[in-house]
Each structure stands twice: as structure tokens, then as C-alpha cells.
Amino acid sequence: MMMAMIYLCCLLLFLLLTFRLIAYLFRWFEISNRPDYQPPPVEVSPHFSGVLAADKLREALLESGSTLVMVSLLLAAWLRRQWRRVRGWPRTLAPDGQTELIVLVPGYLMNEGCMWVLRWRLRRDGFKVVVFEPGGKMLPIDEQADLLGEFIQRTAGSSSRSLTLVGHSMGGLVCRWYAGSGHCDPQRLKRLITIGTPHRGTMLWSLGIGPAARDMRPGSPFLARLSSCRNLQNTCQCFSIASDFDELIIPNEHAVFPGAEHHTVHLVGHFRLVLSARVYALVYQCLKKS
């Protein structure tokens, strides 16, 4: 039994590192094949210096480690849900009141575990936070936005508290559709923050499965409808946070939220965005803007 568990863990580690290698190969291939890509001579280029190469290698290793941490968090969240279901414990909802409520929305195929570190930091700093987890993780993004609306109605009720939506990866698209397509009361929504979100899709959409992955194809009908939604900048504060080293959003420029205040972090991988203290500092800065 013990040997079987060891073999299973080794297989999982191998699959995760293989996926990470494939993702970075896609990333490097995309950069090197851009029409405007002109690699300068090695002897004069800081991009090919040993220091920066070491930084990129270190970040790639950190992102691989972050993937293992993320898998552990996802598994812990799943086990916690099963335990609560067996024990018959109800899900804890946010207390009613006038305080601003922050709703965290995880990305494609993720559960609430991927947001635990971010939730802990926010609660530590005095914010009221809940995490949304869709029942159907491969449903079309607009249907997941419907489920988000139902979750917010159950959690916040009819109170007059204001809302801040924080979405990671595809979760940012769920938040945008919920806020921009008439689901959300514009007088209630105060802020929308996206972290590593493929606002214009990603070339890696084909590695996913289900309607949600197809919605993230660059130029998809969903993204076209999303771009025609109402201008959220007129009704709430909009922010986007993205990395120049995101291996899952190709090209990285697609992570820019049109019209929003944009922040770029250097050398942070896709999964580490919700674990990084640097990213949290930007989230905190956005939340403190009146």
C-alpha cells in the first residue's frame, strides 16, 4: 500500500512537471515567433545575461513548486468538502451587515482551495471574504456567472453592503460577465479586480476540455459578447494584475483588462499569482482606493 502511494505521488509529480515544461515551451515558442522579435547579440543583451537567465530558471522552479502547493490546497479543499458533507455541516456564509463583502472567484477547474492563501491574508487585514466555487467547473462561463449571482444572493442577501469581486484566471472572466451583462446591481458593485485573467483569451485554450475552455479561445463568440458588455469603468473601479512570466496566458498581453487600471508583476508564474506577497500588496492597494 505504501509503495503504491509512493508510485502514485511520483507519477503525479512527473505529470505536473511535464505539464509545466509543455506550458513553458509554448510560451517560449510564442515569443520567438512574433513578427517583431529581434534577439539582440548575446554579448550586449541583458536578456541573455547569466543573472536574468538564473532569475527565469529560479522562477520556473518556484512555479513548479507552487503547482505542487496548489494541488495540495485543492485536494485539502476537496477532502474538507467531503468531510462536511458526511458530517452534515452547512457551509458557512458571511455575516449580514453593512460591511463591504469581497467575493473571491477561482479559475478554470479550480476549487476554493486555490484562494485560501489570498483569503487568509485578506481576513488577517480585516476584510470580510467568501470564496465562490461553481458546481460545474467546465460549464460555459456565462452559466458560471449565473451561479455566481445565485451564490452572492444566498451569501449577501438583500443587504445594502457593497461588493468587491476578485477573480483569478478564468474567474476574472466570470466576474466580468456577471458584472457587465446585467446580473449585478451597478449601485452595489464597488470594485472588480482580475488576477492573471485571459481577457482576450489564450493560445493554450486547446489544452483544456469543456465549454469553458472553448470560451477562452482568442476571438471566441463568448469573448466577442463580453467585449460588447456595458463599460464597467463607468460604474465601478476596475483593476487588472498580470505577470510578464505567465506561462498559461499566451500572449501575456491578453491579460490586460481593457480600460482598467493595470499592474504588471515581473517573473511570477500563473499559479503563484494567488500565492505571491507582491501580488497581494497590489490587491491590498486596489482595495484601499476609495
Image (cartoon, rainbow, N blue to C red):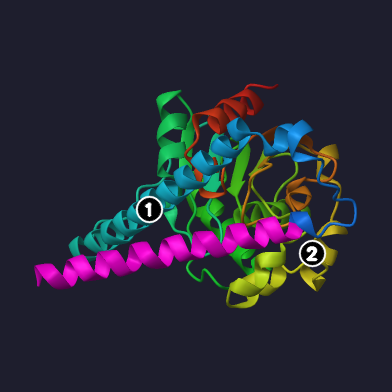
Q: Position of residue 178 (x, y in %)?
A: 69, 56
Identify residue for label 1.
68
Mark 2 element type: helix
The reply to whether residue 143 is visible in this rendering is yes
Identify residue for label 2.
223
Q: Position of residue 30 (x, y in %)?
A: 74, 59
- Cα separation, mark 2 vs mark 1, equals 31 Å
Q: Give the residue type that dot 1 points to.
A: Leu
Q: Quadrant of residue 8?
A: bottom left
Q: Is residue 245 left or right of residue 124?
A: right
Residue 260 drawn above or below residue 155: above
The reply to whether residue 140 is visible in this rendering is no
Mark 1 element type: helix
Q: Earlier in the sequence, mark 2 or mark 1?
A: 1
Residue 201 drawn above or below residue 230: below
Magenta stretch: give its range: 1-30
> For the N terminus, which image quadrant?
bottom left
Is the stretch drawn in magenta largely helix, strand or loop? Answer: helix
> For the C terminus, which image quadrant?
top right
Q: What residue is at 79 percent from the left and 64 percent from the top?
A: 223
Q: Nearer the viewer, residue 63 or 182?
A: 63
Q: Is residue 230 magenta?
A: no
Q: Position of residue 232 (x, y in %)?
A: 81, 44
Q: Nearer the viewer, residue 142 or 25?
A: 25
